[in-house]
Amino acid sequence: MKARFTPALFAHAEAVLGQLLRFDHPADAIVSRYFREHRQLGHADRAFVAETVFAVLRRGRSLEARCAGRLTDRHRLLVALAITRGWSLRELAPVLNANEEGWLAAAKSMAEADMPPAVRCDLPDWLYERLLTQYSADEIIELAEALNRPAPLDLRANTLKTSRDALLEQLAAADIAAVPGQLSPLSIRLRDKPALAKHPLFLGGLFEVQDEGSQLLGLVVEAKRGEMVVDFCAGAGGKTLLLGAQMRNTGRLYAFDVSDKRLTNLKPRLARSGLSNVHPVRIEHERDTRVKRLAGKADRVLVDAPCSGLGTLRRNPDLKWRQGEESIAELTAKQTAILDAAATLVRPGGRLVYATCSLLTAENEAIVDSFLARHPDFALLPVSTVLERQGVAFAGDMLRLLPHRHDTDGFFAAVLERKA
């Protein structure tokens, strides 16, 4: 159902955008809070507001170039509706002023080829320059176009309770259009984005919402029955749940995180999943005594490190405007410290997996290379070998997933083995 376009609805979009462009808080949190405060907005109205303001975040620089100096929230929204959503002047008539028609027609006719490359790609200059050291200018355009599209909705079948094939049949019976994922043997991709939070299959723990690329990060850990496994930066626990299922609910799985709130959010997910081998532990920092107690005991440790999140721009387009060169330098120092601390937990012959959702070599290969230089007792295990055992064909020593190549979020992972 399409929202009825009115000046009042446009005003809501304008109010939300004004809050977003301060970049004080994550965009999804701001939008959610606004909708809680304006419960009179129906489902279609909310969809209109969210899609329109996120279009401005995604396409910020090229839209501003088209605005020709009229850089108000109102004008950004008008150009976003005309360019990214293809609305005509007639459709925009309810909110257009008489003197804006010629301006908007000129904005629509501006050629993207005339824009500087970073503007055309809707990337900040610093990020475009970084990517230019990793990819060709043509590939950055492809990457940027993929990052500027909304992400699809992926599910991970909970193999403690069902199989992917059985879950596909149940989704079909519930009139939810779905197909198997292309990479992960656990993944299902939905054609649309239905509300799932109250669906019986979700409440019964048969699946979790998880990007297919994120699923591969869990698979390269290759956790086994009866092992001691540590998810060092567990967050809300999406990968923790996958590791627990790999372990068939045996052994001990520690979910470490510095945030009480994130670990609290894990508890209902654990209850749905049927897992009883997970031990959530809040730690103060990577050198916490609760970390040191496990020194040399863990069979496998996953470090899904705090990172810039630039691989998730399909979902979090505000991150490219909230991050900068300084934040990358701070993050790489933190990543180095966390990986060093996590390595102390790995027993001889055990496995350490370093992962991020960043696009940048500085947060990925550079961290792994410097770690291996400092830790000659660890060696790189080709990720292609690890994934091949699980029926996933992937070439390369390290995992690098990109939206324009793999239709996932941007992810990186390296598998490091402690010499026996």
Image (cartoon, helix red, strand yellow):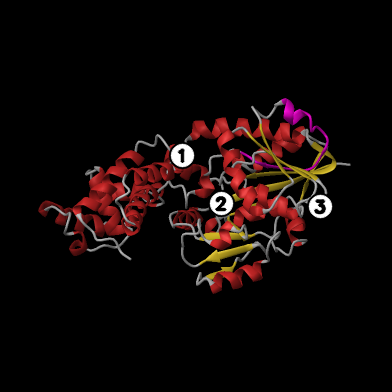
Who's the residue at 46% across and 65% down the image? 192
The residue at which mark 2 appears reads as: 410
Element type at marker 1? helix
Q: What residue appears at the point 64 percent right and 48 percent down from the top-left corner?
A: 270
- Amino acid tagged 1: Trp
| N-terminal label among 3 and 2 | 3
Q: Position of residue 184 (x, y in %)?
A: 65, 61
Q: Does the magenta stretch include residue 301?
A: yes
Q: Name the residue under label 3.
A: 225
Residue named by callout 1: 126
- Residue 144, position in %: x, y? 46, 53
Which of the marked residues, 2 or 1, is nearer the chain's N terminus? 1
Residue beneath the point at 33% across and 43% down: 37
Whether pointer 1 and pointer 3 mark residues with C-beta atoms closer than 8 Å, the reply is no
Q: Quadrant of residue 29?
A: top left
Q: Looking at the picture, which amino acid does disc 3 mark?
A: Arg
